[in-house]
Image (spheres, helix red, strand yellow):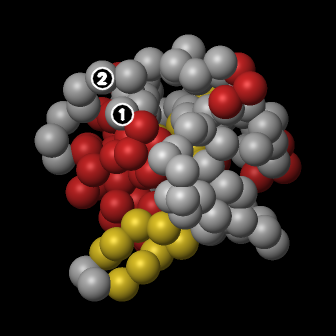
Amino acid sequence: MTYYADLSRYTRHPAGVPAGVTALNVGWLSWTRRYPRFARGRVPEDLAAALTSLCRDGRREPTSRFHPCGLPHLVGERRRPVRMRVAGEDVLLGNAEVAVVAADGTWLIAPSLVHHYVTRHRYRPPEEFVEAVLAARPLRAGAEAVTAGSPR
Ligand SMILES: [Zn+2]
């Protein structure tokens, strides 16, 4: 999966971002950029549950194939497709993006693997992403038109 630095400008699917909206990358991690260069550490306890909801219900820009987790795993540990357990069912990750809206209106766009990175690799996303996820401000598929029309 392509690496993008946290809070760099989102360019993956620019057509999906309306003019006047700032969209930034979060959680596009890569082993080739030298683990553990990404931020790691404690995150609020509620974050995992909130990310579970986001990565189950808020998926957008789906891809045809599943991206594996590129970070180190134990020998024999399954890496593709990455999955998370939700209410007794497996939800597959790595084939979509999720997006939340920061308090200032900025879109923060992450791979759905962000759930795995946080829960399995102790990735600590930028504060504004954590805040937006906990505040449950997802950018749902088809919501572009609603947020695009904000007056200036
Ligand atoms: Zn992993």
Looking at the image, which residue sits at the far top? 37
- In the figure, 136 relative to 32: above or below? below
Find residue 19 and report its image quarter. Answer: top right
Q: Residue at x 54, y 51 (%)?
A: 75
Could you say whether the residue bearing mark 2 is in a helix, strand or loop?
A: loop
- Residue 43 visible to the viewer: yes
Residue 140 appears in view:
no
Q: Secondary structure at mark 1?
A: loop
The picture places residue 138, in percent across and down from the top left corner, at 43, 54
The residue nearer to you, when weighing 109 against 4, is 4
Image coordinates for residue 68, horizontal then vertical, percent? 67, 55
| Location of the C terminus (image quadrant) | top right
Which residue is nearer to you in this view: 24 or 50?
50
Q: Nearer the viewer, residue 19 or 55?
A: 55
Near mark 2 (Cα within 10 A), the count class, few <14, some 14-19 or many ≥20, is: few
Residue 82 percent location from the top left of the image: 55, 63
Instruction: Tell me, for residue 113, which label it has, or none.
Output: none
Residue 41 bears which disc, if any?
A: 2
What amino acid does circle 2 point to?
Answer: Gly
| Quarter of the rendering containing residue 79 | bottom right
- Direction bottom: furthest residue: 89
Label 1–label 2 contact, CB within 8 A: yes
Q: Which amino acid, by three-letter code, is at mark 1?
A: Arg
Q: Is residue 40 above or below residue 86?
A: above
Residue at image mark 1: 122
Who's the residue at 17% across and 46% down the image? 46
